[in-house]
Image (cartoon, rainbow, N blue to C red):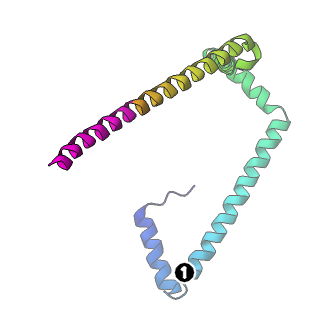
Amino acid sequence: MFDLGFAELLVIGITALIVVGPKDLPVLFRKVGNFMGKARGMAREFSRAMNEAADDSGLKDVQNTIKTATNPVGSAMDGVKDAAKSMTSIDPESNTGKLSAERLAAKKKIEANAARMAAERKKREADEALAKADELEAAAKDTAAPEKDA
């Protein structure tokens, strides 16, 4: 809208400081900010209303027709993109029910096997720990027995 560089903003700021004074400058900036916000809101609302009016009048369809006529390759690519998007958004439950059931059965079988293997490993580790404890106990008895004889 306005093309203001740093130098222009500096001149405006210094002029405002001199004319308004340092005491009232923050109030002025707040009022200018509120005004700019309201102006942007009104411009946004006007633009939205114009776009809605254009959509209601069918201008969008005419615009798409003109775009297709002037750029057939681009419109063909849009068709390809839409087709690719429809191919990638396939619901696996709708057409692969049998495969899903087979995968679910395989998953349960794998989980059961993993649980069985984990239980066996824990049992083996517990047996090894028990055997090691028995060996330590026997070694402790052997070292304690000669001391009693002496």
Residue marked by disc 1: 26
The quarter in which the N terminus is drawn is bottom right
Residue 11 placement (x, y as % from top left): 43, 72
The crowding category of the residue bearing disc 1, from other C-alpha atoms within 10 Å (few below 14, some 14 to 19, many at least 20), is few
Quadrant assignment, res 81 = top right
Residue 71 placement (x, y as % from top left): 63, 18
Q: Residue furthest left?
A: 150
Q: Where 116 sits versus 141, above or below?
A: above
Residue at x 71%, y 15% (from the top left corner): 101
Q: Where 60 sits versus 29, above or below?
A: above
73 and 103: which is toward the camera: 103
Horizontal side of residue 34 vs 63, given as left or right: left
| Residue 71 appears anywhere in the view | no
* Amino acid type indicated by mark 1: Pro
128 and 29: which is toward the camera: 128
Give the residues drawn in magenta, as a range. 128-150
| Residue 88 appears anywhere in the view | yes
Count of labels in the image:
1
Give the SS element for disc 1: helix
Quadrant assignment, res 54 = top right
User: Within the magenta stretch, is there residue 135?
Assistant: yes
Residue 109 placement (x, y as % from top left): 61, 17
Residue at x 59%, y 81% (from the top left corner): 27
Q: Where 8 sits versus 125, above or below?
A: below
Name the main secondary structure of what is drawn in magenta.
helix
Residue at x 48%, y 72% (from the top left corner): 12
Quadrant assignment, res 132 = top left
Residue at x 79%, y 32% (from the top left corner): 59
98 and 11: which is toward the camera: 98
User: Within the magenta stretch, is there residue 32?
Assistant: no
Residue 87 placement (x, y as % from top left): 67, 16
